[in-house]
Amino acid sequence: MKNRTVISAAILASLAFSAAGQTKTTPHAQPGAKERKQQTPDMIAPSTTTQTSTTGQTSTTNQTTATTNKPVVSTDPTVIANQPTREHLDLTRSLLGEWSTKVTVWTNTSQAGTTATTPTTSNGTARFYTTMGGRFVGTEFECPFNGQTMRGAGFYGYNNGEKRYESTWIDNQTSVIFFFTGVRQDNTITWNSTFTEPQNGEKVNLRAVEVFGDNTINYTLFQRTSGGGEFKKMEITYTRTGPGSPVEITPIVPGKKTGTNTGNTTNPQNTRK
């Protein structure tokens, strides 16, 4: 009997040790709960540890470790330097949405800019949307022009390295990819661009002034002349008709963790703080 008792004790100790190493852990139901809730990453998951007493017996104790979905903050300088900034958020607030447009175009017949045709006016539509994690704002544009439908598209952004605003524009009326660089002061961005005229190979300098209101944008494009002057080529008045896509970004603040804001901005504030 004594030997059998020793063998049984050894078997029980072995089984206890084996079970301790393969213990399956499940969340404990709250007192009084009728059913167990499914475990999620935000719930507290118990972990099991094994302790050995001075008598050689083993026992298991449950310890809880909290796990939560927290944003991962990178310490890579390259990643940090390319994150969206307050300038990107300003662009999103100023541009995001669906818009109706009124387009006025002047065709000048003199390089001096003193002679111009009667302006033509047409109504169209535009939309602006965020893309690439909030780093850029894309646009699509459409309106009647010269008896056909003029379509255009482009992107707005802020270059963290150059510390300047940048934008591009293409349309179905030209073969040019227009590239603008800009400086913002309050609610106004002043853009500058240079391109080569396909008809004669001459360089053409453009200046544009874009003024943002609560739900309006006024865009005026000027062409510079060889004599140092300039004349107005086009003016577009935008009126916001819808909120557009959700805002994808929040500004990066050094030393603070940031999340993602996915709420619609139905009345964006364009005043920089």
Image (cartoon, rainbow, N blue to C red):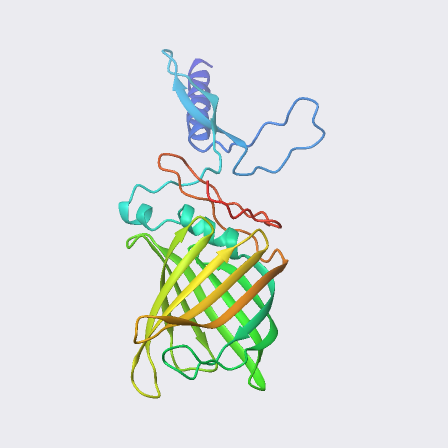
Q: Nearer the viewer, residue 8 or 50?
A: 50
What's the residue at 65%, 33% (across, down)?
Answer: 36
| Residue 8: % across, % down | 46, 21
Viewer can see residue 133? no
Is 33 placed left or right of 51 in the picture?
right
| Residue 223: % across, % down | 39, 73
Task: Using the rendered view, name the quadrant where residue 142 is placed.
Answer: bottom right
257 up-or-down from 202: above or below: above
What's the residue at 57%, 37% (across, down)?
Answer: 39
Q: Nearer the viewer, residue 250 or 188?
A: 188
140 up-or-down from 263: above or below: below
Disc count in the image?
0
| Residue 65: % across, % down | 46, 27
| Furthest residue in direction front, as rendered | 114
What's the residue at 57%, 85% (across, down)?
Answer: 148
| Residue 172: % across, % down | 48, 81
Is 201 placed left or right of 263 in the picture?
left
89 up-or-down from 108: above or below: above
